[in-house]
Amino acid sequence: MTLRFLLALFVLFAAGTAQAQVAPFRSDRIVVEVQGRGPDVILIPGLASTAEVWRRTADRLDDRYRVHLVSVRGFGDLPVGANQSGAISGPVAGEVRRYIASQGLSRPALIGHSMGGQIALRIAADARDGVGRVMVVDASPFFPALVNPGATVGDIEPIAQIAYQALIFFGDQALVDRGRALRLELGNASEALFNGMGWQGGDRRVLARGLYEVMTLDLRHRLPDITAPVTVVYGWSRDDRSPRRDIDRLLRAAYSTLRRPARFEPIEGAEHMVMIDQPTRFMAAVERFLA
């Protein structure tokens, strides 16, 4: 084997290695942490939460999967970046799609909680075959329909404005105090959202706009654009006195326009923070979803 031939092989190998290297991802809207190796799974948190709400889930998956933990700038203690003004969920969904493309991910699985579930639906609707499968956790394409199936964005907009102003001027506690007066519980579990382990706070402006979007965003018309299979996981109760007794029926109606029927996974005993309230049952649902 000649020296020239060996040098040629080295050049080809070096060129291939350089092409395989992926440039670090930088975004002024999201931060992404990666752990583990294997098929790609992207975890997206909900309103006022960071990747920390997914830490236990990621630690259970990273021996078999490469887990990408997304955090939205302005939630928790992350600097707001470009989220300081304008819409939140649409641009964040666009950044996750850019992340998928720039990092060369092949049909990743998406798991999103609450607002993160809506973001996952947007990504799947826009990316089509670029997404392998989607799990939404205690999320609806239109949250007000879980309280009143006949509600419209026009009905909810004045209430959302009150919630926005309350958070801007009076802070997080105003949402807890006025939750029943507003008569809109995000996923029928506003107290769990605002008082539970998932609420990590953040920049008041980002939180207020995020809350407004969660209350008014109606993605039901985008569901037919989703080609990936969808699994819906949610807290459920047998108790007739619980608002979660009827959530199964309401979610089935909300997702009825998907191209293929969704798979529904009720988690008894869980409230809004399903992965924290019932971690063992939730992980069993995740394993079935990824199998």
Image (cartoon, rainbow, N blue to C red):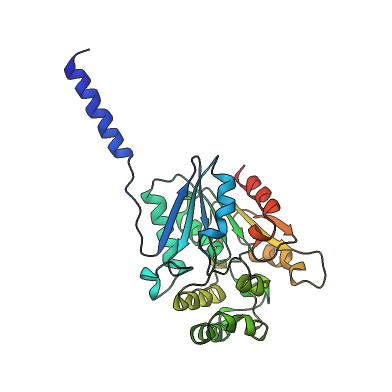
**Residue placed most toward the observer, 267 or 159:** 267
Q: Considering only vertical position in the picture, is 277 above or below 100? A: below
In the rendered view of the protein, which quadrant contains the C terminus? top right
* Residue at 56% from the left image edge and 48% from the top image edge: 59
Left or right of residue 198: residue 32: left
Q: Is residue 86 above or below residue 118?
A: below
Q: Name which residue lies at 67% across and 50% down.
A: 285
Count how many numbered circles sit on residues in the image: 0
- Tell me residue 23's x, y (percent): 32, 48
From the viewer's perspective, is residue 267 above or below residue 129? below
Residue 39 position, x and y percent, is 51, 41
Q: Is 241 placed left or right of 102 in the picture? A: right
Examine the image and state in which quarter residue 13 appears.
Answer: top left
Residue 169's spot in the image, x, y percent?
49, 87
Please state, as top left, top right, bottom left or bottom right, where the N terminus lies in the image.
Answer: top left
Residue closest to the far left: 4
For image coordinates 63% across by 49% down, the residue present is: 286
Q: Residue at x 68, y 48 (%)?
A: 284
Residue 22 x, y percent position in the rendering = 34, 45
Image position of 29 (left or right of 186): left
